Image (tube, helix red, strand yellow):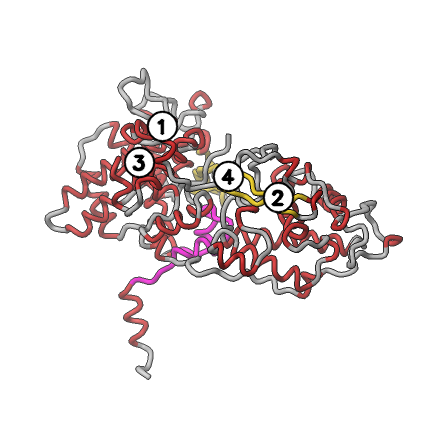
Amino acid sequence: MSQLDFDAPLSQYFFEDVSEHLKSNEIYNLDDLMDLIYINDNNWWKSVHLEKETANGILKWLYDHRLEGVELPDSVLKKAIELTKPYYGHKIGVVAGAQFTEVVNPETHFKKVPQRAGFMHSERSQIVPLESFKVPDLFNGREGTNRGDKANCQLSAEDDLQAIHSWLKARGKNQNTQAAYKKEAERFLLWAIIEKRTALSSLTLEDCAEYLTWLEMLGRSSDETWGARWNQPQSTWLGPKNTTRSSGAWRPFSSALSYSSRKIAMTVVRQLFSFLQKTGYLKMNPFDQISPKIPLLPGEGKPKEYADRSLSKEQWDEILAYLEAMPESIQKARLKVILLLGKGLGMRCSEMINARSSWIAARNIGGSSVMFITVIGKGDKERRLPLSNEQVKMISDYLELRNLPPLGDEAGSQSLLLASMRKSKKNLEGGVTRSGLYVILSNFLGDVADHIKKERPLDAAKLRTSSTHWLRHTFAVTSLEVMPVNVVQTALGHASVGTTSKYIIPDEQTIVEALKKKPDL
């Protein structure tokens, strides 16, 4: 089963009104939401002014995704289990997925048939995956107004759906690439037929120019605003996340698309049309005359969400000073490795709890042997980060305290770098969980906060709100002070330099000094 993306915006999982309310309370992603729950326990929802029914809906959703990386604290888990009982149904708000959907039936020429999501039969619904999609004859593209000369077409495809399949076959056999391309082609074809009521090969330049606007509005607009512009309601397109393709509740989208997702969508559709034109299936490519620029929407790209969730040099110095003053123990050694992986190397929480000894090996760089850790991140993508001698020593010392083979020993290649130390375990080889890592770090930072609260109450307050992901944020912000943004991008494993750039935010002193150099008027 796939894991949830704890860094993704909440709009990827919850309805707009829910995600926007949480965002207004500085809860931007699942990591933030889990932090909120761990800090406030069963009163978490009160601190962000949620209605009880909405809070129950979120809690039920989290429980339903417990096999996809969600781990709730025991007291909250108990409440979540209670919510699964039938008599709680009326007390649980709907926070995700489609509620009511107006379905368009191609056999009845777009007659609307209201159905309850989850009880919809795919044979009645036009919103089905490509493999089940029966294109109405009127919109199959056999006589598309933009069709090229059939005698000179390099494809054997007779209609638009067949042409899409030809394009997918030409993209290669990489399963991830195939899945990504198929998803975007599927969305666009459904949009053309159901929303525009036009064959793909009959779309005009004006039609194609509207697709980006449609993507920008989907999942972000009120029903009134949406209905004034588009033919089909948003609920036609939005459904529960991770629904199987054979389910009647399947929909092409599960939430509003982020900037990067919109960019991918438009890039793939452009490539599809370029292929269809170059092979002679289409006469012209309307996207050639449409700007490829994808604008940021209000609220996207704000650095505050990222850079403000990092620790200052003074705060970090307090953390290190407190750590060094602790008596030597296996707990102290583990804390050192946690801080090393998170703040020293910028690893994600999921990467930290999965890191193994086999990730660390020597490489020859410029005639010298350098130790590297090969981090396996999102989508099994790898990135290599160099380790200093002191960093290697921290990890080696911790492995030794756990009586595990040293780095480089094949016998210990699968040893997890971070171990659980629950008394019920017979050894120290079991790994920590996401929630376990959170508790370890929050308890430690809480101790540091208690230690400095009299002299530095504001710093103490910030430490108490810090969480595992703040280590990665701190790595990003401090690294950008001494490294080029593209280097930091690689170190963090960001697909886009734009994501890394969100961490760039000048401090107030820098702004003051810079503005002094400008004339007053």
> Label 4 near label 1: C-beta < 8 Å?
no
Q: Earlier in the sequence, mark 3 or mark 2?
A: 2
Viewer-side label of 2, 1: 1
The relative height of residue 39 versus residue 413 in the rendered view (above or below) is: below
Mark number displayed over residue 87: 1
Residue drawn at point x = 49 percent, y = 54 percent: 223
> Label 2 near label 4: C-beta < 8 Å?
no
> Label 4 near label 3: C-beta < 8 Å?
no
Image-quadrant location for residue 349: top left
Helix, strand or loop for disc 1:
helix
Helix, strand or loop for disc 4:
loop
User: What is the x, y in percent for residue 264?
Assistant: 58, 51
Alpha carbons under labels 1 and 3: distance apart: 33 Å
Q: Amino acid at mark 4?
A: Lys
Alpha carbons under labels 4 and 2: distance apart: 14 Å
Q: Is residue 376 left or right of residue 470?
A: right
Q: Alpha-carbon neighbours of circle 4 within 10 Å: few (<14), some, or many (≥20)? A: some
**Count of residue discs:** 4
Residue drawn at point x = 22 percent, y = 44 percent: 464
Q: Which residue is mark 2?
A: 183
Q: Which residue is mark 4?
A: 241
Q: Amino acid at mark 3?
A: Tyr
Alpha carbons under labels 2 and 1: distance apart: 39 Å
Q: Earlier in the sequence, mark 3 or mark 4?
A: 4
Viewer-side label of 3, 2: 2
Viewer-side label of 4, 2: 4
Viewer-side label of 3, 4: 4
Q: Alpha-carbon neighbours of circle 3 within 10 Å: few (<14), some, or many (≥20)? A: many
Look at the image and give the residue range highlighted in magenta: 483-507
Helix, strand or loop for disc 2:
helix
